[in-house]
Amino acid sequence: MDERQAVAAFAALGQENRFRVVRALVTAGPDGLAAGALATEVGVSATNLTFHLKELSHAGLIQSRREGKSIIYSAAYEGLSNLIAFLMRDCCQGRPEVCDPAVAALSACDCPTGDALHA
Amino acid sequence: MDERQAVAAFAALGQENRFRVVRALVTAGPDGLAAGALATEVGVSATNLTFHLKELSHAGLIQSRREGKSIIYSAAYEGLSNLIAFLMRDCCQGRPEVCDPAVAALSACDCPTGDALHA
DNA sequence: CCATTGATTCAATGTTTGTTGAAGCGTAGA
DNA sequence: TCTACGCTTCAACAAACATTGAATCAATGG
């Protein structure tokens, strides 16, 4: 991930409705959510949602697939992790002030990666 | 850090010139850089830089202090790490697809935190 | 084939954001 | 105190962004 992509991803996340979309999709897991369900959950019109979904897709943070009449959106985990990795690499630079708290947060997390850090 | 703050921080980083400012300040370390030096390094006018610095300061990503005629800006490490931590907590949710690569990036990093992970 | 449902495209609009140049404020040195 | 320097404030403007409603497209069921 280069600077241009990272900035685009940050810009995509720097909008309330888009951020909520990503959050909802990450929470939903790999199965994702249909556009209609997303619109309801986030509280925006279908038209407006489409606009934001395009933006997020272009930033590599989400992906979509058709399933019958619905279009299912899901989080692009790789894009998200690349963004975190880029942020850490960029901020780390020999300074634990930034990285340590991030790792601490990860350790407190309930996921397998967090568990591994406990060992 | 709540959602509102996180979105503001992402929006702040989602602009090329602002992103470069943060990068330059993180690289510069705790000593920071004078506004003039920053303007030169990022390649924007003094007026424009002030605009972006205000934006970043308001997002909690940088801080400033006066030193003689100059005003020295420096990275707010706490704000940055809070952002990373928030992103990881929000994205992790029991899924190693996101967290694992981030940790891998950290491990490859040359900083003390990365070194600790090697052990 | 027609009607219906789910989602996108299009055009229009109001709002926010980024950029610029001129003017102003604070600090330091002569 | 006068001048120079560094940075910020202000006002103005252009560009980008977010939102809306009407029209359109794709898939399904009767």
Image (spheres, coloured by chain):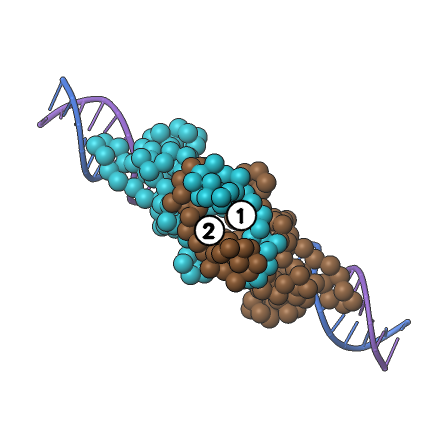
Chain colours: A brown, B cyan, C blue, D purple
Provide the residue designation for mark 1: B103
- Image coordinates of residue A95 in percent, x first then y, are 40, 40
Say which residue appears at 40% left-offset and 43% top-offset. Answer: A96
**Viewer-proximal residue, B32 or A47?**
B32
Give the quadrant of residue B74: top left
The picture places residue A85, in percent across and down from the top left corner, at 54, 45
Name the amino acid type tagged 1. Val
Q: Is residue B67 left or right of residue A55?
A: left
List x then y, in percent, for residue A37: 64, 69
- Type of amino acid at the residue the image marks with label 2: Val
Q: Secondary structure at mark 1?
A: helix
* Quarter holding residue A93: top left
Q: Are marks 1 and 2 in contact (CB under 8 Å)?
A: yes
Whether residue B75 sits left or right of residue A29 in the image: it is: left
Label 1 resides on the chain identified as B
**Residue drawn at the location 35% of the way across and 29% of the way down:** B37
Q: How many marks?
A: 2
Label number found at residue B39: none
Whether residue A1 is situated above or below residue A63 in the rendered picture: above
Q: Which one is nearer the viewer's eye here, B44 or C13?
A: B44
Residue D28 falls left or right of residue B72: right
Locate residue B50, reporting x and y percent: 35, 39
> Looking at the image, which is closer to me, D18 or A74?
A74
Mark 2 burial class by Cα count in 10 Å: few <14, some 14-19, many 20+: many
Mark-to-mark CA distance, 1 and 2: 8 Å
Label 2, secondary structure: give it: helix
Q: Compared to A38, does A57 lie above or below?
A: above
> In the rendered view, would you say A109 is above or below B26?
below
Residue shown at 26%/32% (left/top)?
Answer: B70
Discs 1, 2: same chain: no
Name the residue located 57 percent from the left edge and 58 percent from the top edge.
A112
| The label number, if any, that marks residue A103 in the structure image | 2
